[in-house]
Amino acid sequence: MKIHFHGAAQTVTGSQHLLEINGRRILLDCGLYQGPRKESFIRNRSFPFDPRSLDAVILSHAHIDHSGNLPNLVGSGYTGPIFCTRATAHLANIMLLDSAHIQESDAQYLNRKRKNHKEPPVEPLYTMEEAANVAQYFESVLYDETFEVVPGVTARLVDAGHILGSASVALDIEDENRKYRLWFSGDIGRRNLPLLCDPVLPQDADYLIMECTYGDKAHRDPQAAYDELREVVSRTVERGGKVIVPSFAVGRTQELVYMLHQMIVRSEIPPVPVIVDSPLAVNVSEIFRQHPEVFDDETREFVRSGQHREALGFNLLTYIRSVEESKALNERQDPMVILSASGMAETGRILHHLKNNIEDPKNTVLIVSWQAPHTLGRRLADREERVKIFGEVYHRRAEVATIGGLSAHAGQDLLVEYVETTRAAVKEIFLVHGEAGPAAALTEKLAGRGITCVHYPERGAAVEL
């Protein structure tokens, strides 16, 4: 068997790993590389292999850095199966369409500028039509169901606990008269997160391809995040203000809605309206509600108790799709919690909510995820006193609160445990989906435990096993 590391190698995005086994070719993930615009376009459009030569694709989960280049793969001639869980198939379909909408909108915006400068037009990375064409190739499988990928290779998807439908992939391989197991972690989740089950750890893996995004640090207990959220909402409502939350549409929004639902039911916060104002988040939340089979025991018990409606729906919760409903929120003066995309406050409806609420000291801007440098979200997290929104300067008088501990990725402690569970069997470990610092820290931590078969392959590297 040969492994080619074509993406998420010595970086975080663009997950793409090609396996050559018994003359067959299997692609693990097909994500978008996200970086400088020109470099990203070339890398995402130009595969280092012929997509028509692939026999199968296995998709770990729906996040765009793992699924987002499937439209180009299919557009380049791939017509084979894309194996994934049923929830991932549903989620990936709407996320690819949303990604294509962004690609088309960005191209239209750029082309208006280029036309003024008499420059040739640019093309979107892919179109809505090309994104929609992917769905016909999804082949859904259940967690823990064994299926044949190609002759000599069977697979089993187990719950990775990262987002709805996320999976790690166990491949049992018969190759040149030997049998062994390759385990691809996908993105590893965390224990005790809202809604989702804990990640399944590897079993008897001879070879391990593992993410290392947070290989350099542990995370705080999710209960601490719950407590901080309760305190922020309580004090803001007490002074008659709104809580404005830039929130990612997939995963983070649903976790926050579930926690707020619990707080209201338990009378831990006042019965305040909760608004989800993001068309993608609304669609994603609907898919969450269609897949209660992947919820953890705590969530199922919360729903089963009989006093409450489904986990992501309750009387004080409103999902908003239309622009008119979104604008109407700015006329309301009553306390509320508004969750809106984007998560780094760079685009979307969250900008309008910030513009209309940031200068009122009664309100709170709540930052619930890591913010990239130079984004509005980072400037808010840094509590800058003056910020630009839509080109205009606003004086920040609203409180800014930040909550850590909600990351959906495993921290260093769980990554070490992940390796330890297969220590007796594992021969080689390949760290992917992580920058150099976290990878080095995790490698050192594992070496301290006597685990030295750890590699950090560069993009384009090929390893014969």
Image (tube, rainbow, N blue to C red):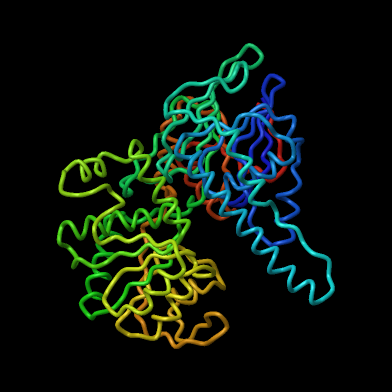
Q: Position of residue 355 (x, y in %)?
A: 45, 80
Compared to 321, does 153 lie above or below?
above
- In the rendered image, the quadrant that contains the C terminus is top right
Q: Position of residue 203 (x, y in %)?
A: 43, 27
Compared to 89, does 145 lie above or below?
above
Q: Residue at 69% x, 40% y: name it.
A: 73
Compared to 345, does 23 lie above or below?
above
Q: Residue at 61% x, 57% y: name it.
A: 101
Q: Position of residue 300 (x, y in %)?
A: 25, 40
Corner quadrant of residue 364: bottom left
Q: Is residue 365 left or right of residue 57?
A: left
Q: Is residue 393 left or right of residue 227?
A: right
Q: Nearer the viewer, residue 364 or 16?
A: 364
Work out whether residue 457 can be spotted: yes
Q: Position of residue 59 (x, y in %)?
A: 55, 37
Corner quadrant of residue 319: bottom left
Q: Nearer the viewer, residue 182 or 92?
A: 92
Q: Residue at 41% x, 32% y: name it.
A: 421
Work out whether residue 443 can be spotted: no
Q: Residue at 47% x, 46% y: name it.
A: 445
- In the rendered image, the quadrant that contains the N terminus is top right
Q: Is residue 150 left or right of residue 407?
A: right
Give the number of marks: 0
